[in-house]
Image: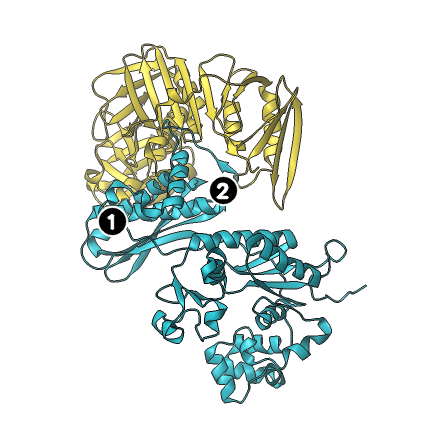
Chain colours: A yellow, B cyan
């Protein structure tokens, strides 16, 4: 095998492919990137068995073939090379690969291309959706997904596709984020729990106006300008999120988003080690306070349109900030029932909601 | 101006604690020898102690020494309730309380002379309050150091009060037998007696180097310091325990995967109930395994948020067990244990969304109430039906 490719092209494509390289797998082949120059399309592939990437590469093939190269190392090498043509060759199709660029010479140990897992390919029905709307929807909910692997379902985002619409929901069991969007191009009635990480990569990698989506039995594939990302669908029952939304609330308070965010940022500096920030509502004002034992405390008030009996509620400051940041527009509508019931954050319309459970404050 | 410390450390020690609670709650036991615990003696009333019965003595020997003793089974929940009430009194009396165990604590009352009284006055009131509010006799030793306060209460027992004023410390300390020194157990005591050393004064007369060469560096230095009445330790609230756990030895006969899972669930139920009773929540679940060859491994997982919920901890524990399955099937399992660490105060607790209509927390609270009232075996998992339902050994509160 022998190919020649410009350094900037190779680097750009390797940076994408490297995102699928397994970080800590004990299966060595998964730390490699498959360079396939045996067919019509020259391709870089990587997988960690949860997500996989197939990235097209523009290069001149002098001798067809395929080889698995160490992923992170190859990226580091190409990043360090000067802007010139890079030759990757494996003479005779076995043994070490030679990388040449100007006066630089590398010899890299390789692994067998036949040992590399078969990656899913798009098949059956796929459709093209508006990329900006899809990415925007992911950005609203992605942060609420759990990072705790012991409850796999919660590490995913529930994606519900309808005719021209998409609804995504994510929860780590402490907060729940739901966003409904118009999604031109979406068809059918499809539900899938997709790893939040995979959707994050779609946001990061995708460019252009549209996104190909193909939902298969065990995989969901996203096509982005020739790059295919496939994600393993997560098995299991996603919590019935619709029934979590309380029917009525006692209070609805509209607050300037920027102002609230600033106050949260300032006060939460004093809420360390998972401690809550306290929100105290009194007639006409909201006071945020946080304190950490042996460190100190912070307190700041802002005028708000609140009426009725004093209400005090504690939230994880990160969860609260995530929610406020995700709200669209200049105004956050905060709806509350009591200090032990969930609070709801919404923007000006009802297309996004962020339900957040309080921290029970010591009495 | 330098003001030398006065005698302002109290050592408060409940007398024959378990037995006193039994005598308090059953008038027929008062004035009679009472032994708590049928097997090993967990506690003996002073009437039984007078006949030679000692804590940790075998039941047979105790009954031989004291045939008319009334033996009662332990009621741990009554003792822990009484202990909590007594600690409540301690907290009302002193700003700094260092608990040593369920029935004894150090109290630092410095600086209270002009507020609530001198240490001796506080000690008198402490005894009265414990008797009035909890109905139990307690002995208090008052001294300038923790060591002397503890020795004083030991000398004053039962139902006593002894103040060692700073100027009388050596006169009090030196005639005492060496067994009163902290760290002198049967082995050290025997070694010293062989050398003809029987009193604290005689220890004080030995050079430190001799004590170290005889008894080792740690013990030798400590005895030298104590015999010279040097004990700089302050009274400080004890740091709370860092983990809560339980384990189950399973024997060497082969067992099914299902049996292992059932044991794990029972352990998690026990541990989480204790956590909730202590008002603690934890983030890290540690699974302990011991194989047929007695080699041990642990597996742990840290959750994003502390919890004391049975279901949440059970899910994590099961996931850990599943990852260890190949190892267990290959090597056989003789013990499974679970511990929750990274404990935090449960007082500021992140609540969870009610995914199920009734929350898991409500279920836990309801089950705790049933078990507190009717015993651990009153409600069990269906999978545990037909299994040995012996209640776990009684535990003191965490």
| Circle 2 crowding by C-alpha within 10 Å: few under 14, some 14–19, many from 20 | many
**B129 to B266, vertically: above or below:** below
Name the residue furthest front. Answer: B28
Q: Is residue B292 left or right of residue B144?
A: left
State the residue at coordinates (41%, 34%).
Answer: B362
Mark 2 and mark 1: Cα distance apart in space = 29 Å
Q: Is residue A8 above or below residue B72?
A: above
Q: What residue sits 32% from the left and 13% below the top?
A: A162
In the displayed structure, B397 sits above or below A322; it is below
Q: Earlier in the sequence, mark 2 or mark 1?
A: 1
- Label 2 lies in what chain? B
Mark 1 = which residue?
B260
User: Residue B308 falls in which quadrant of the image?
Assistant: top left
Measuring from the top left, give residue B102's x and y in whole percent: 50, 58
Q: Is residue B313 left or right of residue B292?
A: right
Front position in the image: A40 or B122? B122
Q: Is residue A63 visible?
A: yes
To the question of a shared chain for discs 2 and 1, the answer is: yes
- In the rendered structure, find residue B346 and report the number of the disc placed on it: 2
In the rendered structure, the answer to whether residue B175 lies left or right of residue B190 reads right
Looking at the image, which is closer to me, B248 or A167?
B248
| Residue depicted at x 57% and y 33% | A277
> Which of the numbered marks, if any, corresponds to residue A31?
none
């Amino acid at each position: 095998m022998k190919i020649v490719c410009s350094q900037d092209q190779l680097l750009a494509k390797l940076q994408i492919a490297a995102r699928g390289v397994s970080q800590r797998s004990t299966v060595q082949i998964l730390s490699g990137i498959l360079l396939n120059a045996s067919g019509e399309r020259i391709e870089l592939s990587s997988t960690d068995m949860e997500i996989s990437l197939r990235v097209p590469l523009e290069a001149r093939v002098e001798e067809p073939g395929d080889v698995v190269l160490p992923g992170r190392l190859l990226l580091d090498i190409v990043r360090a090379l000067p802007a010139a043509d890079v030759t990757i060759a494996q003479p005779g199709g076995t043994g070490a690969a030679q990388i040449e660029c100007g006066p630089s010479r590398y010899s890299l140990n390789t692994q067998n291309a036949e040992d590399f897992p078969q990656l899913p390919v798009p098949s059956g029905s796929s459709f093209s959706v508006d990329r900006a709307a899809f990415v925007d929807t992911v950005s609203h909910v992605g942060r609420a997904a759990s990072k705790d692997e012991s409850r796999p379902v919660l590490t995913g985002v529930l994606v519900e596709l309808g005719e021209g619409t998409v609804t995504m929901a994510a929860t780590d069991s402490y907060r729940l984020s739901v966003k409904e969007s118009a999604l031109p191009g979406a068809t059918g009635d499809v539900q899938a729990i997709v790893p939040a990480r995979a959707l994050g990569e779609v946001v990061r990698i995708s460019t252009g106006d549209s996104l190909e989506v193909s939902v298969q039995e065990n995989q969901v594939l996203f096509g982005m300008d020739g790059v295919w990302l496939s994600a393993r669908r997560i098995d299991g029952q996603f919590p019935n999120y619709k029934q979590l939304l309380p029917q009525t609330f006692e209070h609805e308070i509209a607050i300037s988003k920027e102002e609230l965010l600033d106050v949260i940022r300032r006060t939460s500096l004093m809420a360390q080690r998972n401690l809550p920030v306290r929100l105290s509502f009194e007639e006409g004002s909201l006071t945020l306070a946080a304190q950490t034992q042996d460190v100190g405390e912070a307190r700041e008030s802002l005028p708000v349109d609140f009426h009725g009996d004093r209400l005090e509620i504690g939230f994880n400051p990160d969860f609260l900030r995530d929610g406020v940041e995700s709200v669209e527009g200049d105004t956050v509508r905060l709806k509350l029932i009591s200090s032990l019931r969930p609070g709801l954050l919404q923007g000006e319309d009802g297309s996004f909601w962020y339900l957040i459970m309080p921290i029970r404050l010591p009495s | 101006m330098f003001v030398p410390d006065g005698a302002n450390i109290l050592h408060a020690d409940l007398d024959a604690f378990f037995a006193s609670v039994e005598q308090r709650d059953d008038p027929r036991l008062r004035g009679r020898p009472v032994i708590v615990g049928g097997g090993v003696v967990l506690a003996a009333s002073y009437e039984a102690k007078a006949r030679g019965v000692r804590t940790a003595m075998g039941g047979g020997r105790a009954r031989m020494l004291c045939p008319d003793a009334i033996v009662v089974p332990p009621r741990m929940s009554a003792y822990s309730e009484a202990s909590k009430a007594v600690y409540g009194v301690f907290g009302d009396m002193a700003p700094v309380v260092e608990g040593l165990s369920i029935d004894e604590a150090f109290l630092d009352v410095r600086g209270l002379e002009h507020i609530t009284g001198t240490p001796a006055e506080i000690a008198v009131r402490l005894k009265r309050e414990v008797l009035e509010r909890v109905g139990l006799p307690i002995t208090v030793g008052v001294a300038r150091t923790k060591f002397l306060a503890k020795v004083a209460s030991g000398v004053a027992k039962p139902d006593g009060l002894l103040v060692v004023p700073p100027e009388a410390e050596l006169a009090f300390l030196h005639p005492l037998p060496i067994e009163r020194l902290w760290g002198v157990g049967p082995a050290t005591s025997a070694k010293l007696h062989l050398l003809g050393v029987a009193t604290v004064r005689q220890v004080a007369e030995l050079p430190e180097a001799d004590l170290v060469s005889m008894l080792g560096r740690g013990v030798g230095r400590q005895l030298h310091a104590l015999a010279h009445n040097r004990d700089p330790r302050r009274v400080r609230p004890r740091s709370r325990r860092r983990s809560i756990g339980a384990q189950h030895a399973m024997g060497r006969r082969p067992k099914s995967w299902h049996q292992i899972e059932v044991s794990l669930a029972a352990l998690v139920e026990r541990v989480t109930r204790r956590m909730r009773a202590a008002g603690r929540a934890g983030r890290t679940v540690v699974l302990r395994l011991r194989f047929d060859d007695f080699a041990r491994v642990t597996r742990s997982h840290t959750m994003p948020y502390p919890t004391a919920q049975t279901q949440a901890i059970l899910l994590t524990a099961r996931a850990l067990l599943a990852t260890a399955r190949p190892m267990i099937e290959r090597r056989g399992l003789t013990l499974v244990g679970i511990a929750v660490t990274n404990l935090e105060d449960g007082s500021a607790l992140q609540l969870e969304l009610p995914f199920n209509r009734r929350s898991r927390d409500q279920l836990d609270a309801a089950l705790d109430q049933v078990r507190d009232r009717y015993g651990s075996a009153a409600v069990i998992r269906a999978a545990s039906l037909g299994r040995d339902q012996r209640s776990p050994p009684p535990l003191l509160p965490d």
